[in-house]
Amino acid sequence: MARVGVFICHCGENIARTVDCARVAEYAATLPGVAHAVDYRYMCSDPGQRLIETAIREHGLTGVVVASCSPHMHEVTFRRTVARAGLNPFLCEMANIREQCSWVHEDREAATAKACELVRLMVEKVKWNTALEPIHVPVTRKALVIGGGIAGIQAALDIANGGREVILVEKGPSIGGHMAQLSETFPTLDCSQCIMTPRMVEVKNHPNITLYTYAEVEKVDGYIGNFAVTIRKKARCVDEALCTGCGECQSKCPQGKLKTSVIPNEFDLGLSRRPAIYVPFPQAVPNVPVIDKEHCRYFQDGKCGVCQKVCPAKAVDFTQTDQVVTEQVGAIVVATGYDVMSSGEYGEYGGGRYPDVIDGLQFERLLSASGPTGGEVKRPSDGKVPETVVFIACAGSRDRSHGVPYCSKICCMYTAKHAMLYKHKVHHGQAYVFYMDIRAGGKNYDEFVRRAIEEEGAVYLRGRVSRLYQKDGQLIVKGADTLSGQPVEIAADLVVLATAIQARPGSDALAQMLKVPYDGYGFLSEAHPKLRPVETNSAGVYLAGACQAPKDIPETVAQASAAASKVLGLFSMEQMEREPTVSVVNERTCIGCFDCERVCPFGAIEHREIRDRRGNLLKVVSHVNEGVCAGCGACATTCRSGSIELRGYTDEQVFAQIAAVGV
């Protein structure tokens, strides 16, 4: 006979403000099968948990219902509590009377009545619960990190320093990401290359890290602890083992002469030109060139081949082809970074029409010592030093008309940095900043912005720019200062747009490959914004950096280390323990239609052959891979023969709850 204990939590005032918790406990005590019912202010606290443990022992409880917040918040907490008291943890259920009751109702009587209903439903369900045992899955203790920016580098190094092997895959010819393009970083104005380059070299030389650059992940199979990842290593047409990085091939490439080259330098965002065989930037890791086949004359007409002739190491190999490798890994960290909205998206600000209207990353390259101007601030149009520069914040961000209603988070800070660094380069110049409002929420961030205004003399104008046009070789910026209520017109030599931070192109395809949710803007979604910020709903896949949302460098590094700690936690055991709330197939009644396979979003359905004693094939049925199944229940609702059930949500449990409605 069932002996259920019901524990009503006040959640401080979160629940008790709207729900009469004492009355709910009194009602619960009258329900059939309930042996004990009590309310308490904070059930998740140590005294509250001890109260549950004591009640289990003293009243011989066979099941527990905790009526409090969402199971996403504290289900694991209360399951551990009942386990300490000797009860199977899966004989504990939670009734959500906070999010589903107190937070959505104002009428105390109605909310209390609804809370009583929710408790009654969970009491009926827990009566049908059975003792379940965790699933144990073997773990391949090697990690894959996708993306070689600062997030991927930090995650890879942390995992490798923890004694585990790492495969780091970078789409470009070199690791470094956007941080390698920066001149200095806020709020300390550290040289970006100075703090980045040593870590890039450490990645290359680390014995636990295998680095694949100029490579892409093509396919991911398997499940947490046991992923099979197919990686395509694109042909550089340069043998990495032979290349010495002397640079002779680049200097002799006919396509590389600055006066004749028409190939935009991607690293300088089109502000300079490069040869057809190139290293992205001087500090690139690996320092091995790659041939751009689209622009290489040898691949276009077969008439060049100069790079191969002059290479002293004989490393250039035009016959080299793509290689496909498969790696077995136990966890995946996604660190694919971000892109910035092109200034051309903002035609009203002259982006794409006027060469002296550039975006923030292009301005970074003008400031950088390794940039196209050697660190001198010069106008792209004529190479002259700009005497007046206008910075326009929120150019794309927080703008529904351009499809980006969110804040890009870092623009206020890097705009202040740009204004400051401009003054460091052009002492007599004047910087103007048009802004909506300033968001400087970080350690020493607000002080940094004030320094740009008070010490460096940047003029901040609160208002939007209404029009930008060219006149007599200058850019006329018309706007308004809403604080003074006056219109503003500035003749600028250079305009820098703080364009929106966006998800990388193809992030949605990668998310689908990994079976990770993503939002309407292409950013990957975490499992829980507070309690599981680096995990995803696809077990074994973790997020790091701006692939999740716009982030600055400190936050990115912190999240990368957090993802690495999750991976190391997973790798701390040879077998991983998973919840048994997965689907199970009744092979006797399964008709082999495989509708379940078609609807399973996680690829957990496999085919199993049923044979007789002589080995003759009788039928092929569905089988659930417990390591892959996420317990969503899509297969159970689709099965036309009713042969699939989700443990913990069986037909008996669900029907018991339905029957309790309106009793």
Image (cartoon, grey):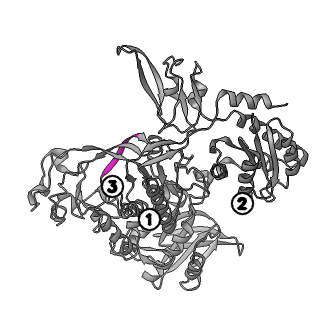
In the rendered structure, the answer to whether residue 74 lies left or right of residue 610 reads: right
Which is nearer the eye, 187 or 421? 187
Q: Is residue 358 visible?
A: yes
State whether residue 181 is above or below residue 643. below
At label 2, counting other C-alpha atoms closer than 10 Å, the crowd grade (few under 14, some 14-19, many 20 or more) is few
Q: Is residue 352 visible?
A: no
Q: Earlier in the sequence, mark 1 or mark 3?
A: 3
At label 1, counting other C-alpha atoms closer than 10 Å, the crowd grade (few under 14, some 14-19, many 20 or more) is many
From the top left corner, tell me how far across and down residue 384 is, in percent: 38, 75
From the top left corner, tell me how far across and down residue 390 is, in percent: 53, 72
Q: Earlier in the sequence, mark 2 or mark 3?
A: 2
Whether tag 1 and tag 2 are in contact, CB under 8 A, the answer is no
Amino acid type, callout 1:
Leu
Residue 45 - label = 2
Q: Nearer the viewer, mark 2 or mark 3?
A: 2
Q: Which residue is mark 3?
A: 172
Q: Nearer the viewer, mark 1 or mark 2?
A: 2
Q: Earlier in the sequence, mark 1 or mark 2?
A: 2
From the top left corner, tell me how far across and down residue 310 is, in percent: 10, 60
Residue 214 included in the magenta stretch of the image: yes
Spatial CA distance of label 2 from label 3 is: 50 Å
From the top left corner, tell me how far across and down residue 478 is, in percent: 60, 67
Mark 3 element type: loop
Q: Which stretch is magenta? A: 212-221
Q: Principal SS element in the magenta part?
A: strand
Amino acid type, callout 2:
Ser
State whether residue 519 is above or below residue 593. below
Q: Which residue is mark 1?
A: 361
Mark 1 element type: helix
Q: Quadrant of residue 124?
A: top right
At 17% from the left and 54% from the top, the residue drawn is 239
